[in-house]
Image (tube, rainbow, N blue to C red):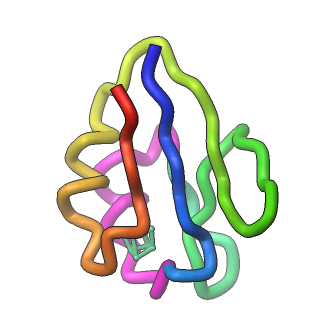
Amino acid sequence: MAKIIQKHEECIGCGACTALDPINWEMNGDKAILKDAELKEGIYSKEVENIGSSKDAENACPVKCIIIEE
Ligand code: SF4
């Protein structure tokens, strides 16, 4: 299992994560949100079996607000 985390307030809405990993990310207004994730105190997080393209999204995020814990 791995965990995908997004520090939501830091997102600048560039759209890189939604382009690279649309299974996990979608735009909502001017920020991206992590699909099917829990939002707690400004942090989205969810556990996934397979990180798939999440690592690409983490690497591409210009403000490094995506964190993958493996
Ligand atoms: S790549 Fe980072 S800054 Fe860009 S939309 Fe996704 S979470 Fe936001």
Q: Position of residue 47 (x, y in %)?
A: 58, 25
How many callouts does the rendering have? 0
Q: Is residue 45 left or right of residue 16?
A: right
42 in magenta: no
Residue occupying image coordinates x 39% and y 16%: 50
Quadrant of the picture in which ligand 1 is shown: bottom left
Q: Position of residue 48 (x, y in %)?
A: 52, 21
Q: Position of residue 35 (x, y in %)?
A: 65, 45
Q: Which residues are magenta?
A: 11-24
| Prevailing secondary structure of the magenta residues | loop
Residue occupying image coordinates x 80% and y 55%: 40
Residue occupying image coordinates x 73% and y 68%: 42
Q: Is residue 35 left or right of residue 20?
A: right
Answer above or below: position of 62 versus 43: below
Q: Is residue 22 left or right of residue 44?
A: left
Q: Quadrant of the C terminus?
A: top left
Residue occupying image coordinates x 51% and y 81%: 10
The quarter of the displayed image where residue 29 is located = bottom right
Depth check, front residue: 18 or 66: 66
Answer above or below: position of 9 versus 35: below
Answer above or below: position of 64 versus 9: above
Answer above or below: position of 3 versus 2: below
The quarter of the displayed image where residue 36 is located = top right
Q: Position of residue 23 (x, y in %)?
A: 48, 38
